Image (cartoon, helix red, strand yellow):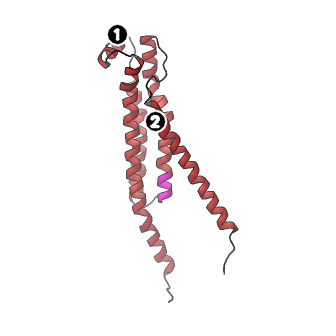
Amino acid sequence: MTTYFSSSATTSSVRAGSAPASRWIGVGGTALVFAYAVFAALQIQVLNPLAAVPGSSLREISAAVGNTADTMGWGLMIVVLALGPLLAGTITSIGRRGRIPAAIMLAAMLGLLMLGTPAYFVASFPAGMTLADTFGIAGADHSPWAWVLHLVSLLALVALIAMALSAVIRASVRSIAPRRA
């Protein structure tokens, strides 16, 4: 059976088929990026200070920091950690209109998760320095929970590399495969 409009039918079915996947990836990715940012904030303002000054409560740590001219860097932390979820939400809203293929949506969300470690470093710097100056300790992470954030970012990087290698291999196979007339 011959169809005269197969190219337009195929194009619309491809768009319709990829749009739901792109939407789900966008919603799930945005949720993961948001969870990453919330956990990073919890690590910066609660878990790390408690691990840095063992035996002290969060209230005691805050009181000691309050006696100095330093702050725990709430403003910078909120701005830096909010960027990821805002970007993810924007990408998802564009993707909901069916304008972003599923693979690109996945790569974008993985890229945001990968950039979580550098964002965490920038967001945690003022709090770490405040703890170092106030208590005479190192400004690095004292809580082991930061490794969860770094592991998520590393896994996102590995997934992005795997996606890129897969795309290169598929393109190579297509270019080498014999052409049929």
Query: In the image as oriented, which residue stretches furthest toward the bottom?
Result: 1
Q: Nearer the viewer, residue 54 or 123?
A: 54
Tell me the residue that label 2 is attached to: 149
Q: Nearer the viewer, residue 11 or 135?
A: 135
Q: CA distance from mark 2 to mark 1?
A: 31 Å
> Is residue 58 located in the magenta-colored stretch of the structure?
no
> Is residue 105 located in the magenta-colored stretch of the structure?
yes
Q: Is residue 115 above or below residue 123?
A: below
Q: Secondary structure at mark 2?
A: helix
Q: Main secondary structure of the magenta part?
A: helix
User: The residue under label 2 is which amino acid type?
Assistant: Leu
| Labelled disc at residue 154 | none
Residue drawn at 39 percent across, 56 percent down? 24
Q: Is residue 107 above or below residue 136?
A: below
User: The residue under label 1 is which amino acid type?
Assistant: Asn
Total residue callouts: 2
Per the rendered image, the range of residues in magenta is 101-106
Tell me the residue that label 1 is attached to: 67
